[in-house]
Amino acid sequence: MAHRGRRGGQSTQSRRDWCRGAAAGRRSQRRGAGAVRADDAATWCRACGIRRPDRPRGPRRRRASQSRLHASHRFGRGGLGLGKRLRAGFTASRSQRAPGVEELYSRGAHAATATFDVGDPNLGLETARSIELGLRKTEGVWRWSGAVYQTRFQGYVYGALGNLGGVDSAGDLVASGSRGDFTRQDFRAGQATFRGFELESSWRLTDAWTVRTVADRTLASIDGYGPAPRIAPLRLGGGLQWGHGPWRADAQLTWADRAGRLAPQETPTASYTRLDAGVVYRTQVLGQQTQFSLRGINLLNEDIRLHTSYLKDGYPLAGRSVVLGASIDF
C-alpha cells in the first residue's frame, strides 16, 4: 500500500520481512554493528542492531522531499511461527531526520501549493520512536497480512496554515474583504503521535482469477495543535485480477471516507468511490518484449479530491478517462 501517513518508520519491505530465511535453518550474519540470527524453522527469529547511513547531518541545498537525512536505530525485531502458515511479527525502531531546506529557510510564495512558506532556522532534529505488531498468513489459496503501529515524534516538523487565502506574493495581508492568492504556512515543530493499521489479502479463486482487498487508516495528532494536517482518511479497496497466456486484466474499486478530522484552517473533503480497469497484452515485436495496454481511469466519473493535497478545493483529479499505451523493452 501506498501512503500510510507517517514518517520516520521502517520501509514496508523491512516491516513485513519479519522472519525471512528462518526456514533455511540456523545461521548468523553480521554487517557493521548489526547482527541477524534465525533459529530453527517455525520457531522464534530475532534481530537487533544499530544502523547509521553514511550521510551528512546538516541540510543540503536540494528539494525538501530529497533532504530527509536519517540516522536509525533498530532496537528489536522478531517473529513467531504459529504453525506452518501463520507468522506473527514485532518491530521497534528509533530514527531521526534533519529538517529540509524549505522548512528551515523558506520565506516566499510557493506556486505549486498556493502557500507563502515561512521557515524556522531554529528547528532541530525530528526523532521518531515506532513500534509495530503484525500477523500474516503466508500459504494457501487465501493469504493475508495485517499490522497495527504507533509512532511517537519529538520535534515533528509540520506546516501550520494561517490567514487562509489572505496574503499576497510578498506575504502581506490583503485588504479586508479581499482574497489573496496565497495561504501563509509557518513551519513549526511539536510532539506528535501517529497510530494506524493496514490490512491486505489475496484469494486465488483459480489459476486465472485472483481477488484482492486492502484497507488502511492513520490517526495523527500534534500536542497543543490538534489533528496533523493532510492525513488521508479511511480507505477500503478491492480488485479482481485475471491472467491467461499473454493477456492480463484487472478491475479495482477504491472507497475513501469523508475527511472530517481537520487540522486548524483545513476544510472537509468529501468521500469518493473510484473504479479503474484495464487490459494488457504482451508479445514479441522484432524480437523485443512489447506490451500494449488499455486502461480506464475513474470510470464512474466521480469528483475525487485528495485530502492530502494542498490544492484539493480548487483542483480535483481528472474525470473519466481512457489511456492507450505501448511499451518496448530493449
Image (spheres, grey):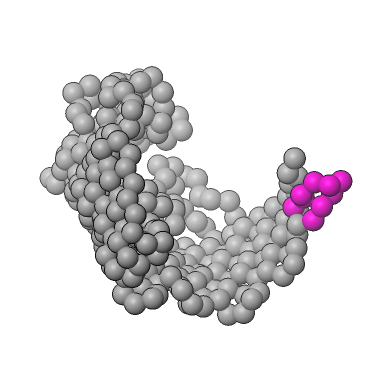
Q: Which residue lies furthest to the right in this view?
A: 286
| Region of the chain picked out in magenta, as a range | 283-291
User: 21 or 2: which is nearer to us?
Assistant: 21
Q: Which residue lies furthest to the left in this view?
A: 224
User: 9 or 62: which is nearer to us?
Assistant: 9
Residue 288 falls inside the magenta stretch: yes
Q: Above or below — where is 71 with respect to 58?
A: below
Residue 150 falls inside the magenta stretch: no
User: 259 or 46: which is nearer to us?
Assistant: 46
Q: Which residue lies furthest to the bottom in this view?
A: 205
Q: Above or below — where is 60 with respect to 27?
A: above
Q: Principal SS element in the magenta part?
A: strand
Is 104 on the left or on the right of 192, as rendered? Answer: right
Dividing the picture into quadrants, the one containing residue 247 is bottom right
Is 242 on the left or on the right of 56, as rendered? Answer: right
Q: How many marks?
A: 0
The spot of residue 53 in percent (x, y) is: 32, 32
Q: Which residue is at a point 27% across and 24% down the rendered structure image? A: 57
Q: Which residue is at a point 37% across and 62% down the rendered structure image? A: 25
Q: Above or below — where is 142 with respect to 113?
A: below
